[in-house]
Amino acid sequence: MSKLNPTKKYIFKATDGTVDAAKLVYVKKILGENLSFTETDVNYTLDFSNKSFANTTDEIENRNDFASTLANGVFTNNDYDKTITINGVTFITHPVAKEGSDNRIQQAFQFDKNVKKVSVIFGDKYNMTEAYKGGIILNGGDNTELTLNNFENTTLTGDVYFESMGDFNVKTKKFKETTLISKLATGDTLPKTNNLFFGKVAEDAETFYGTGIDKIFENYYRNGASDKILVKSSSAPFNAKDALNGGYMYNENGNYNNNAYDIDINTALLMAEKLTNEFENVNISGNATSDVDTYLTPSNVRFSGDVSGLKFTTTAGNGLIDFAGVGPKKISAPIAKIIVGGLKNAGETSITGNVLDYYNVDKSVLSDVDVYSTSIKTVYSKGTRSSFKNTWTGTTFKTGPSASTNQAWEKKGRGETVSDSDLISKLDVKAKANNPLLQKLLDENCLVYG
């Protein structure tokens, strides 16, 4: 290739109907309009078995040379993209960010919708740091057959930046484009990862919500490949507050609005083990009945299923933690309100919160429930203090529900200003009313204003 004369005209020929995409765009870069390639019905290959992705692409367009032509500052403007296009293949050089001399220049092979087949051969390792959207983009989506050879035996390393993962649709829970990244969330042949970093380029990530990472973890779990994941842990939470569109998970009467972003329990447990243990403003669905110790730390989280096998080994977060199905074996959240919809083996459970709501638990079960803790300030149930196994003298027991405070506790979990009176159940306030008119105004179905 180095002997190409850019002043002469050349014709590029396919071999048995197959073309090496990297060689094609390299020749196009050297020859420009002097290269002719008119074959239409061809398949493309990319071979990274002997050379890394970065070495392969750098021969086409040197990232450092490209970066030196760019202005200083941080940018993510697609207008800075440099492309080489020929016969359905576009080679993209894309600046994700530039900070002084620390450049993030990524590249990718993009295949047109008319391309029928793309075959990629992987070596032992594949570094994602220089790979824009994973390095492979299919404009034709599933209409283009993508074959990933030796993918299950390769190891993904490097950095995966939120800015270049590709657009993720939080409603459909799918990536909008078909890329190598999206294949991690949908494919059944999955590679290992080794200290793979997920995050933003120029600053710490605020949340993993909206990136599609949860679907990648879910796909690894569903395909029995959880042990293949080794990623760098992060202090960023999975906070799906934006999914609520300015609203709340619970209405003013304390009922769940069925509007929170949903994550499967096994996905959440895997992410808590490997990536981040903090989950906020989500609904976690599914059952976990086998004994599992987890670092998962919920704040404003609803568990819709049976999680009777879970032991939360770290102090949980704040706000509202709602076990709408069956509660866990162990959790401690001294500054949160915990709702327990049901219990299994109540005598073996240890549930501690600032406020505990056992109203939906059968009264006959309460005799096995231990609420002996200085952290427990108030307990709501169908019973009284004597209904429980062990109690702390400083704990207040209320007969009735506390649903009317759910939204206030949710707000508190978000860090919003909430008065102490908002955290008091309408049931409690109603009990203090001294005249029939005030009692009527404070009926459970009426709003209470401080």
Image (cartoon, rainbow, N blue to C red):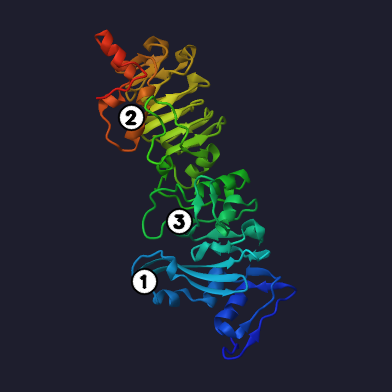
Given contact means CB atoms under 8 Å apart, are the residues at marks 2 and 3 in contact? no
- In the rendered view of the protein, which quadrant contains the N terminus? bottom right
Which residue was labeled with disc 3?
A: 162
> Mark 1 or 2, which is nearer the eye?
2
**Mark 2 residue type:** Ala
| Marks 1 and 2, how far apart at CA | 48 Å
| Marks 2 and 3, how far apart at CA | 33 Å
Q: Which mark is residue 408?
A: 2
**Mark 3 residue type:** Phe
Work out whether residue 294 or residue 267 is closer to the camera in this orientation and state it.
267
Work out whether residue 235 or residue 429 is closer to the camera in this orientation and state it.
429
Q: Is residue 382 left or right of residue 72?
A: right
Give residue 354's position: percent from left, percent from top.
Answer: 34, 26
Instruction: Using the rendered view, name the quadrant where residue 40 is placed.
Output: bottom right
Give residue 331's position: percent from left, percent from top.
Answer: 43, 30
**Few, some or many C-alpha atoms within 10 Å of disc 2 (few <14, some 14-19, many ≥20)?**
many
Q: Is residue 87 left or right of residue 60?
A: right
Say which element carries label 2.
helix
- Relative to 142, residue 66 above or below: below
Q: Which mark is residue 101?
A: 1
**Mark 1 residue type:** Ser
Given contact means CB atoms under 8 Å apart, are the residues at marks 1 and 2 in contact? no
Question: Does the rendering let one see residue 311?
Answer: yes
Say which element carries label 3.
helix
Say which element carries label 1.
loop
| Marks 1 and 3, how far apart at CA | 21 Å
- In the rendered view of the protein, which quadrant contains the C terminus? top left
Instruction: Using the rendered view, name the quadrant where residue 203 is placed.
Output: bottom left
Marks 1 and 3, the one that precedes in the sequence: 1
Given contact means CB atoms under 8 Å apart, are the residues at marks 1 and 3 in contact? no
Give residue 247's position: percent from left, percent from top.
Answer: 38, 37
